[in-house]
Amino acid sequence: MSALGYPFQGKIWYYVENSYGSGPTSTAYPISIKVLDARIGLGDKHKPLRGIDEPEADVLLEQCNDFTFHLEYIPQCGDTLLANAEQRSEDKQCDLSSLCFFLEVNSCVNSTDKTYYIIKGAKLKSVGISASHNTEYVFSMDFSVKESEITDSSSVTADEPTDLSGVLCAFNIAGSITDGDDNSLAYIVDSIDVTIDEGLKDYWDHDSIDKQYAIAGEKDITGSVDITLDEGGGNHLQDVIDQTEFSIKIALGGSGCPLITLSGCKWKSSEIDKNNAGDIMKESAPFTATGCTLGVVS
């Protein structure tokens, strides 16, 4: 009898493909020592067809393969995945890089009871970056995928890269959240949540059930920060009214850790609430950004 699919027995790493869906290359990159979730999805593979003669569907029409991949992990200093997945480089015709992921399940059991997934043609649909008081940062990524291959071959396992050695990134440790002039956004910043949507669009040709293209479109950058409304909130409300432009620099840790700079930011709305809860005045302040640059804390 075959083994169950066991918990805590997974391995994952990634490659930057030479072309869309081409698969593993000569260089494998680690993701994080703390991957929280790796989930392969497939859209509905059939739809029922029925006629006027009977209520039951008697034909199940095959649908195109629409693979997706969801990945959540705690970033470390030295992280490369976010930059490789999110930046639209000139050598890629200003499009997103196409990645390949290798996922091994049942790492500790007999080879006949393992499954190896090679996830080809993965392009970033969106990424969420979030953290709050006393928590770790989490990158939550959704990818469009050209093909997810199931294989019993262990040849790719020879590519396993060395784990990242940088510290795990946490909200209250070593990092900072400031504006473009390195000033704090407020006396207390209690959380941050950023979403980058790449506007990715998938395309299938008329003669194939397999995805042929995934093209990045419009990029939307939105988010919110929980901040105190200092001096009674008047200055913040005036910035919202005047649509004062600012930048947000998110240092996820100390030297060598990821640095995310959001430019062209403006506060989207505001609610000034003075109540009898006995708490200081604060707000989950939403904003929109027009640009995003990824770097490393010096």
Image (cartoon, grey):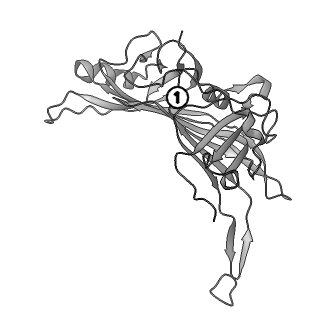
| Residue 213 drawn at (x, y percent) | 78, 45
Side of 172 relative to 87 (left or right):
left
Instruction: Find residue 3 and report its horizontal and vertical position in percent.
Output: 60, 59
Q: Position of residue 132 (x, y in %)?
A: 37, 30
SS category of the residue bearing label 1: loop
Q: Quadrant of the C terminus?
A: top right
Write down the residue under mark 1.
Answer: 75
Q: Nearer the viewer, residue 121 or 63?
A: 121
Query: Which residue is rendered at x = 70% and y = 84% of the image?
Result: 51
In this view, 248 is above or below 36? above
Expressed as whole percent of the image width and height from the top left, the position of residue 242 reads 40, 21
User: In front: 148, or 95?
Assistant: 148
Q: What type is the residue that disc 1 sits on? A: Pro
Residue at 60% across, 29% down? 82
Q: Is residue 250 left or right of residue 55?
A: left
Place residue 94 in its image quadrant: top right
